[in-house]
Image: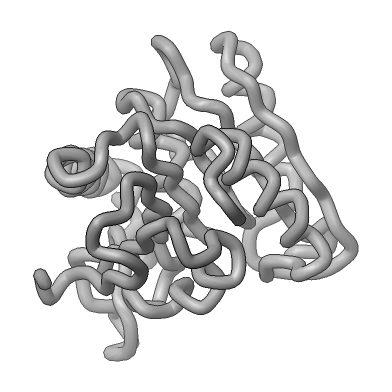
Amino acid sequence: MPTDQRAHGPAEAKQRLVLLHGWGADADDLIDLGQELAGPAIGLVGLRAPEPHPQGMGRQWYDLQNPLWPELVAAARRSLRLRLLELGEQVPLEHTVVLGFSQGAAMAVDVASSLPLAGVISCSGYPHPDWQPSGRLPRVLLTHGREDPVVPYAASERLVQLLQGAGGEAELLGFSGGHSIDPALFPQLRAFLKDQLGGAPA
């Protein structure tokens, strides 16, 4: 297994949930959540962001502390796209849902717009400054705390506007809380996975 990812679940799984962690976390950060949501039949892959976090712990998809970070997104986008295409050689992307949190959610929604994924779950995400969705977009489910002090709730509202404006199907589930993934929304997340993965048990 590559060192830049963590895999769980059956090796012969025909459906997959790919997990993209947030700024300062690592590949195993969302595995427990994935197991909670996906059930035993769906394979899980947590991807490790390519760059070390500037504070020495965890990883980052790009350096948010660099004032030129919007320009760094392009390289991160290309890298993640290639990694997802490689995973698609094992389990088709049409049978894959990508879930991201915070910076990982921004990456998930961005890169998903150019790939034939089954769906995307964006938790506490935001749109990249230069991002414009186009083409045949996968269905996107977004969650966001209305009192989020890290990424404003309005960021996910903007994501929904951009996705729907490009003809995509996007729904935002807000909750009373901060920068987190609300367990009260797990039933909706499980239902989304089941719908997008063709009735896979969740």
Q: Indicate the position of residue 74 as horizontal and vertical percent values.
A: 23, 39
170 up-or-down from 20: above or below: above
Q: Indicate the position of residue 26 as horizontal and vertical percent values.
A: 34, 77
Whether residue 149 is visible, yes or no, is no
The structure residue drawn at horizontal position 76% and vertical position 70%, both measured from the top left corner, is 183
Q: Closest to the observer: 78 or 14?
A: 14
Whether residue 146 is visible, yes or no, is yes
Q: Quadrant of the N terminus?
A: bottom left
Left of 123 or right of it: where is 197?
left
The structure residue drawn at horizontal position 28% and vertical position 70%, both measured from the top left corner, is 7
39 up-or-down from 159: above or below: below
135 up-or-down from 27: above or below: above
Q: Indicate the position of residue 125 as horizontal and vertical percent values.
A: 57, 51
Q: What is the quadrant of residue 152 in the picture?
A: bottom right
Q: Quadrant of the C terminus?
A: bottom right
The structure residue drawn at horizontal position 43% and vertical position 12%, both measured from the top left corner, is 136
15 up-or-down from 197: above or below: below
Q: Indicate the position of residue 69 as horizontal and vertical percent values.
A: 32, 52
